[in-house]
Each structure stands twice: as C-alpha cells, then as structure tokens.
Image (cartoon, rainbow, N blue to C red):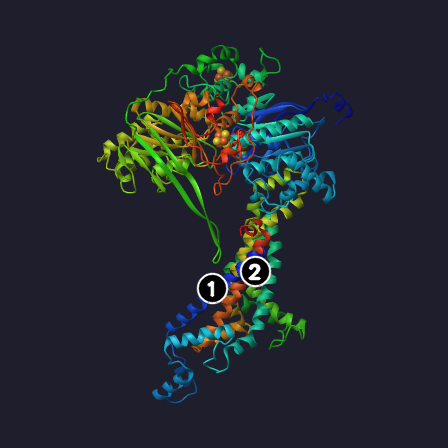
Amino acid sequence: MLKYAFNRILLMIPTLIAVAIIVFLVLRVVPGDIVELKLTAEGGEVSMEQIEAEKKRLGLNDPLHIQFYNYMIGIPQGDLGISLWTEKPVAEEIGSRIGLSFQLAIFSTILAVLLAFPLGTLSALFRGTFLDYVIRIITIGGIAVPAFWLGMLLIMLVLSFGKLPPLGTVSFFVDPLTNFNQMIWPAISVGYRYTSVVARMLRSSILEVLSEDYIRTARAKGLYERVVIVKHGMRNALLPTVTVIGLEFAFLLGGLVVTESVFNLNGIGKLFIDSVIRNDLNLLQGLVLTVATAFVLVNLIVDLCYAALDPRIRYQS
Amino acid sequence: MSVSKIKKYNNDVLLDVLNLSVTFELKNASVKAVDNISFKIKRGEFLAVVGESGCGKSVSALSILKLLPPKIAKIESTHLIFDGVDISNWTTSQLREIRGKRISMIFQEPMTSLNPVLTIGDQITEPLITHLKLTANEAQNRAIELMSMVGIPEPENRLNQYPHQFSGGMRQRVMIAIGLACEPDLIIADEPTTALDVTIQAQILELLKDISKRLGIAVIMITHNLGVVAAYADNVNVMYAACIIETGSSNDIFKNPSHPYTIGLLRSVPRLDKSREGKLATIYGLPPNLMNPPSGCRFAERCPIYEKQCDNSPALIDNVTSKNAKVACWKTDFAKVTGAKMYASNKKTKKSVPDVNATPILTVNNLKQHFNISLRSGWFTSKSGKVKAVDDVSFSILPGETVGLVGESGCGKTSVGRSILHLNNPTNGDINFQNISMNKDSIALVRRDMQVIFQDPFSSLNPRMTIGKILEEPLIVHKIINDKASRLKRVNELLEQVGLYTYMADRYPHELSGGQRQRVGIARALAMEPKLIICDEPVSALDVSVQAQIINLLEDLQAELGISYLFIAHDLAVVRHISHKVIVMYLGKIMEVADEKSLYSKPQHPYTKALLDAAPVPDPEIEKNRKRTILKGELPSPLNPPPGCVFSTRCPEYTKECSKLTPPLVKFTDEHFVSCIKVKEFNA
Ligand SMILES: Nc1ncnc2c1ncn2[C@@H]1O[C@H](COP(=O)(O)OP(=O)(O)OP(=O)(O)O)[C@@H](O)[C@H]1O
Ligand code: SF4
Ligand code: SF4
Ligand SMILES: [Mg+2]
C-alpha cells in the first residue's frame, strides 16, 4: 500500500509538468493584448511607442523560449511571475483569495457526500417505490439545472424570506456561524450537481452489486440483511462512486467560477474571470496551474481511497 | 404445527419436499421454472439432480431457502419439511437462522461467489460468529482448522488474503469450507465443479464426498455431468422442462433407465472407456419454452415413441420394476424394452479412415508461441515476463483425419490453433499447409482452405446480420459465387447441410438456440469449401443432447467431404469419440501423442493417466470399483515453469532426474510418442 501511494505521488510530477507546458503554449496562441487594454483603460490616446515600451518592460517581447525558461524555472520556487495588470506577484494574488474558494469547495464536497449517501442508498433499497421516484426527480434536477441559475434563485429566496448575511466574507475561525450562513447558499448551488451525480452513481452501483453472486453467497450464509447490505454490498458499491467523486470535482471547480460571481465572493473564481477579461496571461497561467494541481491532488486522494477499499488494486503493485 | 405430527414423522428423512412450484412473474410473461416437484432426501444421502440447461435445477435448489429475488419469484408448496419442521411458510428472517447453519449452499461460479474486497478469513468466520456466537479468536482458529480440512495449504497465512489471490479450485475449497463451517445437516451444491478442470474437479468432489460421509451430511448435487452422477450419487432426480420425470437409485437410472428422455440422454454422451461404435444417439429438437409449455407430456415433441395418449400429462408414479424408483411416462415398459432401438436407428457409421500414406495436409514443426507480458506497469517500474504458451510443438494432420488436442485450461491448446491460423504470429517454427510454407503473406492464399469454428457461437456471429447474410458474406468477399441467385441457392444448400431449415436464413443470431448458432458457425466455415477446419471447443458450451447432434454433424461432413479437423477440447470423452489421433498438452508442451485407441487404453505418460483417472464415466458399476489416484496441486504458473519435465511438480512418479532435463518426445510404438524419461521403466 505504501509503495502504491509512493508510486502514485511520483506519478503526479510528470503530470503537472505536462500541464504547465500545455498551459503555457495554449495561452500564447490565444489572441488578445493586455498592454493595449491596460493603457487604453486609463483613457486617452496611446501611441505605438508607448505600447512597445510597456511590452518591453513587462518582458512580453522576449523570445518565446526565454519566457518559457523563466516560467518553468519559477514554478518549483513558487514564483509564478507577476500579474500583468496589478503588477503584484501572481502567487500573492492567488494566495490571498484561495482560502475562500478552498473553503467553498470543501464545504460543498462535504455537503454533497453527506447528502448523496443517504439519497443514493435509499433510492436503491426502495427501488421502484414513491421514495425512489422522488429522489430520482430531485437528482435529475441537479444535472439539468445550471449552478448560476440555482444561485440566483437561492438569493431571491433568501431575500424574500429573511435577510441576506452581511457582505464581505468573515473567516470561519473568527465567526463560524456567520461564516456558515454566508457559505451555505453558494455551497448548495455548486454542490447540487455534485450531490446528484454521486447519488445516482451510488444508486446504480448498489443495485448492480446487490445482484452479484457474492451477495447471494452472503445471504446463503445466514447473515443479517443489514450486514449483507452494509458490509458486503456498500463497500463494493463505493468503488465506482469514489471514482465519480474524483471526476466530478472538475465540474465543481467550473461551478465555483460562476457561483462566486453570482454571490459576489472574492475568490479564485472571480479572479479567473477578471484575468480572462484583462488578458492577464501570467495570472491566468498561475490560476490554471493551481486548479490543475488541486484536481490532480483530489484524484490522488481518490486513488488512494480506491486502493484502500479494493485489495485487487492494492496488491497489484 | 402439531407436536404429534412431528413425532410421527419419519426421522430418517431430512428434507421432504411436496409439490414445490416456482413462478417468475416477469413484466410481460410468467415463467413456471419449477412445476410441482416432490422429492425426499435422507440423512447422509448423496442426491444428484441432472438435466439440461434451463430445466429448473438451480431455481428449485434456491427456492428451498428462498434465495430467489422475492419480488418476481413466487414460491409455492404443499409442504417443505426439514428435520420434522415445515419451513414452507417461514419468513426470510426465520430462514436466516438455518441458512448456513443447518443448510448451506455451494455455488457454481467460484470466481464470482466470494466477495472481492473481504479477506478469506473474514468470509469463513462470518457464519461461525453469526450462528455459533464464537468470538473472533475462536472463529479464526476454527477457520484455520476448516481450511486445512479442505486442503488449503498454509491456512494461517492465507487467512488474510483476498479471493483474487486464489485460483478457481482454491476458491471452491474456500466455498466448501464456508459451507461446512457450522457442520450443517444438508449441503446443496449447484454445479460445484463445472467451471473447473477435470483434475481439480476430481479433487473437489472427492473432498466433498469424504467430508460429507464422515460428518453424516446429506448432499444435493446439481450437475449436468452424468459421469459425476455415476461416480458419487446414491440417488438421482432427472429433471426435464421444470418437472422431475424420473427418480431412482443411481443403479436404476444407469442400468434400467425407464423414461425415453433419460434413455436418450444416457445414449447421447460419448464414452471415455469405449472407442466409437457408431454415431451418438441424438434427441431430436430442443426442450420446450417454459413460458408456454405443452399441456401433455413435456417430452412429447422430442419423444421417439410418442402416441396419442401422451397428450395427457403423465404423473410421476412408482416404477414397477425397481422399488423406490419413479417415472413419469405412459409407455415406460415399452420404452425399456425398445430403449436400444429407439435411438439406435441411426446407421452405424464407422469412423472414416484416413489414408496413412497420403501427404499430410498440415505439418507443424517446432512451433513456438511466446508472449511477453508486463506484470507490473507504472511510469517508473515495469517488469515483464515471458509466457511460453506453446513451446516446441510438432505434429501433422492427414487429409480426412481428425486430430484431437486435449489438456487443462491454460495448457496452450487455443494458442496452437491461433498460431496455425496466424491470428498470432508464431515466435518460431514452421507451418506447412498443402505444401505451402505459411507466413504472414502466404496465409492469405490458403485462408479459404483453412477455416475455424469457435467455442462461443454467439459472440462469433455478427448480431446485426441475418443468418442468410452471414453465410452469403464469405461467398461475396472471396468471390466464390458471383451471381446473387446461385449464391442464395448455395446458402440454402449450406443450411440444409448442417441440419437447419432454409427459412432460418431470415433470422438473426439471437433468434436461434446455442446449438443452432453453432450450426451456423459450421455452415459459415463450410461455405469456403475448406480442407481443414480448426474447431476450438466447438461443443463445450452446449448441452449433451445438442453436443451429440453437432459431433454427429462434424463426423458426417468428414465422411462426405473428406475434411480434416484439428479438434481442440478439454472433454476427454468427446475427443476420444471424434478423433483418429490425440495429442495431450501440458504447459505448452506435448506430453503424449497416439492414435485414439492406444492413448485411451494404454496411456503411458503419468499426466495422461492422471487425466483419464480423474474423468468419471457414466456407469456406477465401473465407478464403484475404480480406484482414483488424484493429482495433487495445480497447474504451475506458466511464467515460471518448473525446470526439466514441466509436469514434475505434480507427477506421482517424480524423482530427481526429472528436473535435470526436458524429456524429449520419444517413440514408444509406431503410432505412439511419449515425453517422459521413465516410459521404459513403467513397462519393464
Ligand atoms: N431471476 C429469474 N428471472 C426470470 N427467469 C428466471 C430467473 N432465474 C431463472 N429463470 C428461468 O427459470 C428456468 C430454470 O432456470 P434454472 O437456472 O433453474 O436452470 P438450470 O436447470 O439450473 O440450468 P443450468 O444447467 O443452465 O444452470 C429457466 O427458464 C430460466 O430462464
Ligand atoms: S409419456 Fe409419451 S411422449 Fe412422454 S415420454 Fe412417455 S412415451 Fe414419450
Ligand atoms: S519425466 Fe519424470 S516428472 Fe516428468 S512425467 Fe516422467 S516421471 Fe513424471
Ligand atoms: Mg443452474
């Protein structure tokens, strides 16, 4: 198991290097010019010379391979360059906002898993009953309804039934209750899809597992039905579900971007949108790398969980 | 239930089933999978249930403990008395208390019947903890005891392993250990060895017999292997289309079968202990559809002595000639007298004899097929191994000859066939077909003359093409017949040649039975007018009566068209029946080659002897006097074969010399070659 984990962690390195390279290349191909945007934003006429000078100052005129070299050398040192817009280090820009997004992501993942398990299990065990239909309708909704729309709906609901928590996020460690009140609505709007996908996967894999031969064996042994389902059924049904939890995390990140805008949260998602609008290559680069790292990390955790659950994987290496 | 009733009840009878029926209520139909069956089993008795696929054997066994899906399976019975208590109306939670404790089950598929994510130890101790309330420690000790009882080596270490670390045979031993855990009164074993090789089958069945006799456990064993029945059963229930149609002692059934179906079934199995005398008997047609069974005798449509009165359903009544035997047929007496005639009306075609002086159509010299496989794959670690699937194999096939290729699973039989067809490019060696040395390029020249039939008739036919199109396609592709009208004529001719109706040309593969699909596979091969057909386990997915039809068909085609066959199979009796010459393989090497008669009557190689020893024959008298030497252990890993003789790890005659060098295949008599250094010694 340790060896397996070690291998998996090693494997992350080439993956991340590949991501870094791809990000760099793709962003150089995308059209758009930050310098012009930045200078004209301040109003007034801008001359060609001014633009050239600014470009030179920001290092945008360096040959591509020099830019690439600086970029790749910087990454392992935690230096992601400077934001072309604010001219603050990219790492600092991301660092000051990542906590909020991280909290939101964790919050909605926990929420999703906590809700998905009972929903999926009940729906499978009461297949074909009214309860099953209700749950299936709810979870279909999660896949059909976009996160931003749900977010707006929630804001309107909260507005008409009570008062919105104060603007400007309060840290969880300062005032957990207010923080919870502020985070729960965005968490629901991002987590709804997550919950639905996981619940549906769990339902179908439980149903599949319960018709396996070893479940019949467990019943034939005279085990209590509860043991048959929890010990023999659930553990096997978790395997495909865990995989889906990992894959869906990517969608969650996508959901964050829009939801943060809707709820006006100053997290990574908002930074993302800003950097795209401003054509801030360096910042965008740093953001994509951060998100990719998060995704790779989550999938590492998923793989490790999978191995912990499934001896066939664990013993393979 | 009244106390007096229990007292009066004959205590010798362990399970008494009266009028058991099971109906599956499906969305658009209902299937009566078990129809009003009654039987009894005594303590310590070994009862076999036989019958063809789908006749309701498994369903009836599962219904006793209500292990069928409750929503769709409706189980009814007059009573189901187990050890004096009627359990027919018990709820599942009441039944839970006797499941695994007093009645336990062993299932057919050892590969899927154990939970992959729980340790073997956990799975064996579960019933001990649940039923006998042992502590974890006590249970563990008992599990170790049970594992050594069922012959699992190093039980202490293997306790913490998972099912995927066990071979099929070992998993089945684990299932038996679980079944025995609480020392039940009854074990129901549903085809416990069908998925296993014959030497492993013998190990498992001997084990089951020994332990049940020693502990006085009654066994109900479901099987379709008549040899197994003859070797182990005290009594037999024969099922057909959801009903029991004949029951009696094993002697009654094999010596004096009374029902025309039983008679036909016994005659349609090829015999391991006899050369082919003529064609196999075949039972015409197929079992009826249970969604809509015939109202009278269910066998009527296939029965050679059907009469008008058979349109009324015959009851299962005492069979006059032997006591305790019962049969459901109006014309039992007549069937018995004319049993031999009923099915033997086929002409006694002798085997066609190939001309030994002719040039062989196929010669294979020093064929090697090695596979490099990666054992571990990661970005930074990778280790690979070499499997010698075929290692230095040479043989030849004459025109009109059938060469049988036998051996246990994983011995390289299929690889030989695939190399000859160049589906895999051989690592080494040459293959000569009709005097053309074959390689990647020349194979195209001879493809027409060399055809193949696969084991699984379904997956080898395109599901979206009609049978007619499937047969027409090769005629178009290879430009054999160019105009449409004559092509269609040829398709009809082919269908008739393999015993199908011409109207079936419009059907799709899923609309045919397994046997019919296999006939389509044969017809497709025949379309090319081949000289050689490589048959890879062509009958192993089929029921005995259908198997007999296909074997007869292959033999007829040989007699008529002079085709040669390479017949790959694991069933020794089938191979004996159809082959002129037989090759025995083990771990990629040939152990013995001989003409059918000498190989089966005077086997020389210890492995051949063991194989023949392990296979039971459908005759209880022979079986009673048979002493088996059971091979120990299992096939070694092909990645790491033993040095010297590959059979040395399991050979009862092994001595040190055997590990020194690989024994060459040497001549024993003109037609008989053996690869064992001690052949001379055996005959001294
Ligand atoms: N769960 C189910 N739902 C519907 N029909 C079923 C179900 N299980 C079995 N059947 C039907 O019941 C009949 C008897 O099946 P059963 O499994 O008892 O056959 P069997 O004699 O054990 O055959 P085999 O030798 O292939 O194992 C078949 O027609 C089968 O299709
Ligand atoms: S009852 Fe008639 S049809 Fe049925 S098996 Fe007997 S003779 Fe044949
Ligand atoms: S060579 Fe030795 S080990 Fe091999 S079969 Fe002969 S006696 Fe057995
Ligand atoms: Mg069955």
* Tag in front: 1 or 2: 1
Q: Are marks 1 and 2 in contact (CB under 8 Å)?
A: no
Give SS at disc 1.
Answer: helix
The amino acid beneath tag 1 is: Pro
Up-down relation of residue A279 to residue B149 (above or below): below
Residue pictured at 26% horizontal, 35% vertical: B436
The amino acid beneath tag 2 is: Ile
Identify the disc placed on residue A14.
1
Q: Quadrant of residue B671?
A: top left
Q: Which residue is mark 2?
A: A301
- Label 2 Cα crowd, 10 Å radius (few <14 / some 14-19 / many 20+): some
Mark 1 or mark 2: whose residue is earlier in sequence: 1
Q: CA distance from mark 1 to mark 2?
A: 17 Å
Quarter of the rendering occupied by the N terminus of chain B: top right
The subunit carrying tag 1 is A
Q: Position of residue B462 (x, y in %)?
A: 37, 40
Residue pictured at 59% horizontal, 60% vertical: A112
Relative to A114, is A83 on the left or the right? left
> Is residue A91 something one can see in this rendering?
yes
The subunit carrying tag 2 is A
Up-down relation of residue B155 to residue A168 (above or below): above
Residue pictured at 59% horizontal, 44% vertical: B115
Considering depth in this image, is A299 or A108 the residue closer to the camera?
A: A299
Give SS at disc 2.
Answer: helix
> Is residue B25 something one can see in this rendering?
no
Residue at mark 1: C-beta within 8 A of ligand 1:
no
